[in-house]
Amino acid sequence: MSVFGFSHAPVGRLAPSPTGALHLGNARTFLIAWLSIRSRGGRLILRIEDLEHPRVKPGAAGQVLEDLRWLGLDWDEGPDIGGDRGPYVQSERLEIYERAIRRLSEAGRIYPCVCSRKETENLQRAPHADEHILVYPGTCRGRFASWEDAQKVMPEGRIPVWRYKTEPGVSEFDDALNGTVRADMENDIGDFALARDRRGAGYTLACVVDDAAMGVTEVVRGDDLLVATHSHIALQRALNLPVPAYMHVPLVVSPDGRRLAKRHGDTRLSSLRESGVSPERVTGLLAWWCGFASFGDEMMPYDLVGRVSVMNMNRNAAVLTDEIKKWLGI
């Protein structure tokens, strides 16, 4: 039996979004996801999540693949090598999401919502488990007979969002790194957004549907999505889909605890490569942040397979200090 609770070979995934170049924070999470699978002889799927249309940058998907390969990561299925569970680009899977949204609509589990983000902010009632989550109280529940009726009242250029009818109660799941994670669905989650697309092509729905369709048994991602996982599990159960095992890992942050931004230096893998930094040095840094190596060690990802366990990784946020930036030359 594996540490994630599976007796068979696990299936994991790398799911980058082509909204810009990969940076050190992305790379650390992807390395952990890759190590978890490769250390147990499982299969790894690469899926391009390109449904955030306004932010998707031309050519970014190709850059993502190049960056991952340069770092020494590989996969068994993906848009570049194929596989039986493709297509592996979400914008090519719209019919699948449309079928899922139809099932949820026919079951009365979703409704169209016309409230803006500002209106949703004004509806907030109390502090929540995650300050980044806007808890929507269900204002538009039962307001419209169809998506088309909701669209008629929207200002030009805006469309409704599909929302899931959250059922009251406590949700909990066991995270491989964080233990038991609980949330009050009504007060901490609310009627969460599925997609701002009539056919259901949005992150939450697409992620859940694709993980199930591709046979993913474990999901490793940043702990900024820890609370949102309750929404994913609710949706999996509504669609009668398997619930994968989850591991949410700490992010890479600046010394003041904030997420990495341009003001903290250029941490893009492509920039590091162009400046002459070796992939061994980058992997060594990522491994040190995880507690798998000493500072200054240089290695490739396959050097870690069989030597480390992701369950023994450092559970604190990784900090990009001035010493590290100097060592990398950024």
Image (cartoon, rainbow, N blue to C red):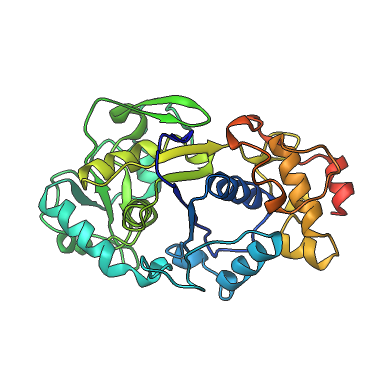
Identified at 44% across, 27% down, the residue is 129
Instruction: Please state the horizontal and vertical placement of residue 210, each as a whole percent of the image.
Output: 35, 57
| Picture quadrant where residue 62 is located | bottom right
Is 238 on the left-hand or right-hand side of 213?
Answer: left
At horizontal 44% and vertical 44% (from top left) the residue drawn is: 218
Residue 249 coordinates in the image, percent (x, y): 57, 37
Quarter of image, res 191: top left
**Relative to 89, residue 122 above or below:** above
- Would residue 284 appear left or right of 250 to someone viewing this image? right
Foreground residue, 134 or 308?
308
Against 187, residue 46 (above or below) is below
Exactly how many numbered labels are in the figure? 0
Determine the residue positioned at 22% across, 57% down: 101
The N terminus is located in which quarter? top left
**Which residue is rendered at x = 36% and y = 26% of the image?**
183
Q: Is residue 145 left or right of residue 284?
A: left
On the image, the x and y values in percent for residue 28 come to 65, 47
Q: Quadrant of the C terminus?
A: bottom right
Residue 150 seen anywhere in this rendered image of the structure: no
Please state which of residues 238 and 85 is positioned toward the viewer in this rendering.
Answer: 85
Can see residue 109?
A: yes
Instruction: From the viewer's side, name the closer residue of 316 and 14.
Output: 14
Image spot of residue 79 (x, y percent): 48, 71
